[in-house]
Image (cartoon, rainbow, N blue to C red):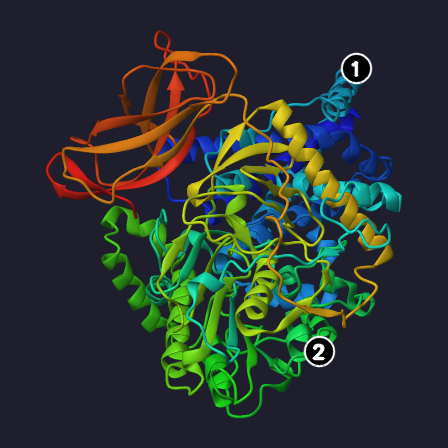
Amino acid sequence: MPRFLSLAPALLAGVLVLRLCALWGAWPVQPLPAALLTAAAAVAEDLLVFVRSLPLLCLLSLPVLWLRSARARGIGLAVLWSAWLAVQIALEQYFATTRVPLGADLFGYSWQEIATTVAGGARLGAGAVAGWLLPIATLCLVLYLCARRAPRWRHGPATAVLLIGVALWWCPLPSATAVAASEDARNLVRNKLAFFAGDSLRYWRDDAELPLPASDAVAATPGTAGDPEFPFLHREQTPDSLGPHFTSTATPPHLVFIIVEGLGRSFSGPDTLRGSFTPFLDELGGRSLYWSNFLANQGRTFGVLPSVFGSLPFADKGFAALGERMPAHAGLFNVLARQGYATRFYAGTDLAFDNERAFLHRQGVQKVVDLTSFGAGYRRNPYSSWGYDDSELVARVLADGAVGGPQPTVTVIQTVSMHTSYRFAGQDAWKRRFEQRLDELGVSAQDKAGYREFADIYSTILFTDDALRRYFDAAQRDPGYANTVFVVTGDHRLPELPMDSKIERYHVPLIVFSPRLKRPQRIRAVSSHLDITPSLLAFLAHQHGLQRPAQVAWTGRGLDTAAAFDSRGEIPLKHEKTTLSDFVAGPWFISHDQLYRLEDNLRLVATDDAAVQAQVAERFARYRRANALFAHTLQLSPEGAAPRLAAYAEPAAPMPVEAAPQRRSLYAHDVVAPAGVDAASVEVAVSFTNATDRIAGPFVPLLVLGDEAGNEVRESYAAAVQLAPRASARARFQVPLAGIAPGRYVIAVMPSHPDTGRRVGEGVYRVPIKIRCCAPGGGTLARP
């Protein structure tokens, strides 16, 4: 042990050099104090993991340390520790490419799929090579220097250090990631080896758990028909929430779905912190029903087809991952095909990935065009292993007709360009368009560096947006255009752009457009991919006389079309194939046992209400039990893919919705900042509600204006308030802006103690605002 600890600084030096290389390669553009804090937290995280790993490293190294030859010991340790370091290098390189740490999701893909993913995103540059070689070179050099010196550790202190390393495995120490202000910064700080090991152990532990007996699982699943063999089966009674928004016509409409790879709300649509880079989709959304608080149910593409077209449970690694074991089931494709619809699906990739082709065949899609059947006359993307870019994909679809033929048709277009490597032919022109877009968004010169760091990604987003514009331009000339319903959404939010919160990975837009729409509307109610098929079949059954299954295994409850922010349903969210750790229950979001309150634009407010957390956790556990039972039995419905169809019947009563767990605190909510004001000040309004059974206050509403890193810039106070039990009040702040530099800022609002200024309830944090330069000493405040 003394010899081991005398040589261990060599491995520590390699680990620290690797961390410095990783920080250099993925360094976020942020103020220097925040950057230094991020770097310090990352190094602290690595030091903690290194001390914890010392006992294991010692055991692995003992056979080498017992060798008699000093030369053999040196070579053996260099090889062993280089292998240990190489694993960490690979994990850091994965993070540098994807911007998310690799966890147990590695076990959800075949080797062929892993090879395709790596080939699609890997870039071999001088920086990457240095990141591989420099840590190992440092390890070998320091190991050589340490080996030349006599061991300085004694058995007693050496044993104590190793025992401390063992003890740290059992001590619940706070993570250094707690100092990070955003999800992206937390991922940067995390030790990637520790994350991979912990997530893998969690996966194998959970995988070993047996599902509950059938009767228990069904009892824990609301809305079921009570059959213990079919935990999700229930009578179909989804209301027609779309019908009131459309003009009437006797002919069933064409349906066109556009599933946009990586399309997230953080860079598309209104109220985005960094501005929108989808000008065409923004214009289309302004003529549509636009869900701004919409959720994908998966953090990667693996679940989008089962969620959107089948409202299906996840099973273990995603429904489609069941492959040939996928149970026959009712979905949008086969239900409509039985009633005269043609069905077709277009993608520029190989649909064997994520078993998408097998899923489409299981649903009986009549025409499937992908990489293997694209046809002649089209050029593959020479800069990506995935296949054809979105411009070629649009051309291929238009060759067969934009919306279909004389019979009603379901057309699905699944794009791919907004994926690593984010490169395509002619990209230089789109990078110039990206620079123009920065000017259109009013991005200041000092902020442009942060955008240019991701120029490949932003230019690709603009490229895909333009390809969709060309598709819609052509679709307008199609004879069936006037009676077509277009549905546009993202499969998940691309991870390579920095994320502020855990839910951002799922936050995507939903656009429903049709020439038959009565009027456009922005919808702030929360819905998800699981709600699309139930609502569309209800719409077609109610408005056009089609039929829908009498019994279904939908896990969604239909699209909520409320204009005001509202969240009522229960929405499971699967981050990776092997990770089901996120769940929405009414206005609450739980992720890895941390509870958050949902606000408009899906902002998260961390809360520590133990009673509410217990209720939300139980609802999540109830879904997991039912999902585990399904994964065990693979039973959805006794009728398989051909259920009895029935005409639409108006529900005798509203669909039962289990009441959401109620807050038991004083909290702020519904922050409103105007679109633009003069340079002197800005008015911000916020509501406060006392959800307790006792009088709250008096308290002082406090507003803190901070920079993106969370550093306070200015405070403002409103008049003191006292609230009766279950009462609410509106407070207004007048925030002076003189002397504040232009740029992006965030607002935090909370109730505070009138004497100490300390927070006395729940606040709302990181509401984005932008100060634009227009006058000396101040700026104009506008929501991006």
SS at mark 1 in the image? helix
Residue 31 coordinates in the image, percent (x, y):
34, 36
Is residue 740 visible in this depiction of the protein? yes
State the residue at coordinates (19%, 32%). Answer: 737
**The disc labelled 2 sits on which kind of residue?**
Gly
Q: Quadrant of residue 47?
A: top right
**The disc labelled 1 sits on which kind of residue?**
Gly
Residue 768 coordinates in the image, percent (x, y):
35, 40
State the residue at coordinates (43%, 45%). Answer: 601
Between the C-alphas of marks 2 and 1, the distance is 70 Å
**Left or right side of 218 for 542:** left
Neighbor class of circle 2 (other Cα within 10 Å; few <14, some 14-19, many 20+) is: some
Q: Quadrant of residue 198?
A: top right
Q: Which residue lies furthest to the right in this view?
A: 213
In this view, 24 is above or below 162: below
Q: Name the residue under label 1.
A: 156
Is residue 709 visible in this depiction of the protein? no
State the residue at coordinates (71%, 32%). Answer: 7
Quadrant the N terminus occupies: top right
**Left or right side of 215 for 309:** left
State the residue at coordinates (48%, 43%). Answer: 566
State which tag comes first along the sequence, 2 or 1: 1
Q: Name the residue under label 2.
A: 364
Q: Which residue lies furthest to the left in this view?
A: 776
Q: Nearer the viewer, residue 242 or 741?
A: 242
SS at mark 2 in the image? loop
Residue 413 coordinates in the image, percent (x, y):
53, 75
Residue 199 coordinates in the image, percent (x, y):
71, 42
Q: Residue furthest bottom?
A: 376
